Image (cartoon, coloured by chain):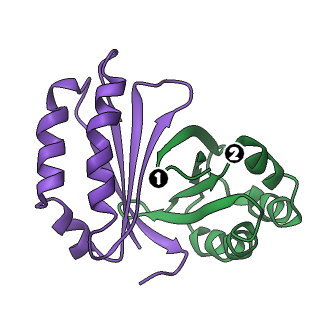
Chain colours: A purple, B green
Amino acid sequence: MYVTVVYVHVREGHEEDFIKASKPNHENSIKEEGNLRFDILQMADDPTKFILYEAYTDKEASARHKSTPHYLTWRETIADWMAEPRKGVVYDGLLPTIE
Amino acid sequence: MYVTVVYVHVREGHEEDFIKASKPNHENSIKEEGNLRFDILQMADDPTKFILYEAYTDKEASARHKSTPHYLTWRETIADWMAEPRKGVVYDGLLPTIE
């Protein structure tokens, strides 16, 4: 698995906007070829902080996500709500062993 | 989903030890009642850093994991390889909507 953990920090008051805008991104992303997980998480101790947990079979499938209409729409929709730039950290998903 | 993102930093030279010890923890954890994901990830840019991505249906199922034999064995086995204390961050898994 090729995993990107994306850390998102939204400005206070835009938590629900972000969740609403992320739903179609989630729903379409899980249908992409090579997608294994596209979980959207909200931090229990700080609801302005989110994680997008994006697991794909490989780097190429992950890269293709960034040219999909649902990703591009999401990116534009949420742009003004960011409290700081998003940070994506790449991991090699060791287990489960899904290719 | 009730998700705990556990950040692990191992001392250099113990990466493979950690992976080997984590495999039975993964294999048994995914069989636990209420477990949804138990992914083990290694950071692409720093192989001494790992994430355990532990998703359960609810807080109670997540808590039960900490009294399982495989968790307790794993915790003891890896103790001497830690470069710093593990840090678990709790998230509310919004999507997918699995109860």
Q: Residue at x 51, y 74 (%)?
A: A94
- In primary-sequence order, the first of circles 2 and 1 is 2
Query: Where in the figure is residue A50, as x and y percent of width and height?
Result: 40, 36
Q: Amino acid at mark 2?
A: Asp
Q: Check the picture and name the quadrant holding the N terminus of chain A.
A: bottom left
Answer left or right for A21 relative to A89. left
Q: How many C-alpha atoms fall within 10 Å of the one at disc 2: few (<14), some, or many (≥20)?
A: some
Answer left or right for B67 relative to B37. right
Q: Check the picture and name the quadrant holding the C terminus of chain A.
A: bottom left
**Pick the front one: A30 or B30:** A30
Query: Where in the figure is residue B73, as x and y percent of width and height?
Result: 85, 65
Give the number of the disc on residue B58.
2
Query: Where in the figure is residue B92, as x and y percent of width and height?
Result: 55, 38
Q: Amino acid at mark 1?
A: Pro
| Residue A86, image quadrant | top left
> Is residue A33 shown above or below B3?
below
Badge 1 marks a residue whose secondary structure is loop
**Pick the front one: A26 or B50:** A26
Give the number of the disc on residue B21.
none
Q: In this figure, which residue is indicated by the disc labeled 1? A: B96
Q: Residue at x 22, y 33 (%)?
A: A85
Tag 2 and tag 1, C-beta contact below 8 Å:
no
| Residue A92, image quadrant | bottom left
Answer left or right for B25 relative to A6. right
**Which chain is indicated by disc 2?**
B
Q: How many C-alpha atoms fall within 10 Å of the one at disc 1: few (<14), some, or many (≥20)?
A: some
Q: Residue at x 19, y 66 (%)?
A: A63
Badge 2 marks a residue whose secondary structure is loop
Q: CA distance from mark 2 to mark 1?
A: 14 Å
**Which chain is indicated by disc 1?**
B
